[in-house]
Image (spheres, coloured by chain):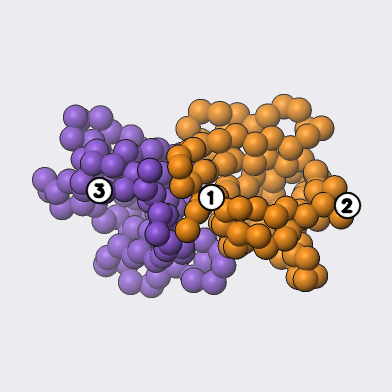
Chain colours: A purple, B orange
């Protein structure tokens, strides 16, 4: 990737791609590119850090263990507090879904 | 603003608008909407925090005190280390410039 989040998309569409943009002690910023991938069935993320996540293109659905689901499209964002179990239950198969995720400590 | 960064743009185009999305001890995420505003002449930001900034729409130019200038358009991003003097020397007068800025401590 150069310095544009929409460019240099990975070629291999068989998997999800995570690239670190910033890694410091208290914050990590990632670009995540999904090509239809989802979390494994019954897999739940349970993270030490808080996460603020937005969708730059495409579409992705975040499901919480309480059953709530949020489908994010371009510009939509969501905050996921630490240890809030969640999974990605759907991403677009029509186009790349580009996520920008900021993980941070209190 | 609801939970979409492209929506509910402020009506008052006579000034720049800053909205906090996340404020925690070590990170602050802001949406900044500019309508042609720039930093005052000879004004330099000199920030305690590091800043990672991207442009979601429109166009903005960040100038550093060493003379380097970077014009950011949709998807372009830039990291500005703490105490690196900079100013915004131009933003689009054609359309809203929407910045997403992440300020963080080491």
Are discs 3 and 2 both within one chain?
Answer: no
- Which of the two discs, 2 and 1, labels the residue nearer the N terminus? 2
Q: Is residue B25 left or right of residue B49?
A: left
Q: Is residue A93 left or right of residue A99?
A: left
Q: Quadrant of residue A69?
A: top left
**Quarter of the figure that contains the N terminus of chain B:** top right
Residue at the disc numbered 2 = B41
Q: Residue at x 67, y 63 (%)?
A: B84
Instruction: Look at the picture and state if B83 lies above or below A42.
Output: below
How far apart, in angstroms, are the residues tagged by discs 3 and 1?
20 Å
- Residue A106, percent from left and from top: 38, 43
Which residue is outermost to the left?
A42
- Residue B7, percent from left and from top: 58, 33
Q: Nearer the viewer, residue B74 or B105?
A: B105
Instruction: Look at the picture and state if B97 lies above or below A98.
Output: above
Q: Chain of mark 3?
A: A
Res B102 label: 1
Q: Element under label 3? A: loop
Q: Nearer the viewer, residue A1 or A94?
A: A1
Instruction: Look at the picture and state if B44 lies above or below A66.
Output: below
Q: Is residue A59 left or right of residue B42?
A: left
Q: Residue at x 57, y 53 (%)?
A: B49
Q: Quadrant of residue B6?
A: top right
Q: Residue at x 53, y 50 (%)?
A: B102
Residue at the disc numbered 3 = A47
* Residue B56 visible somewhere in the drawing: no
Q: Residues within 10 Å of mark 1 (few under 14, many from 20)?
A: many
How far apart, in angstroms, are the residues tagged by discs 3 and 2?
45 Å
């Amino acid at each position: 990737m150069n310095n544009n989040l929409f460019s240099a998309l990975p070629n291999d569409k068989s998997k999800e791609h995570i690239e670190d943009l910033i890694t410091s002690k208290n914050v990590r910023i990632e670009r995540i590119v999904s090509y239809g991938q989802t979390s494994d069935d019954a897999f739940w993320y349970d993270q030490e850090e808080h996460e603020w996540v937005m969708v730059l293109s495409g579409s992705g659905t975040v499901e919480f263990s309480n059953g709530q689901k949020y489908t994010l499209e371009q510009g939509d964002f969501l905050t996921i507090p630490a240890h809030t179990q969640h999974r990605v239950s759907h991403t677009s198969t029509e186009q790349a879904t580009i996520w920008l995720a900021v993980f941070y400590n209190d």
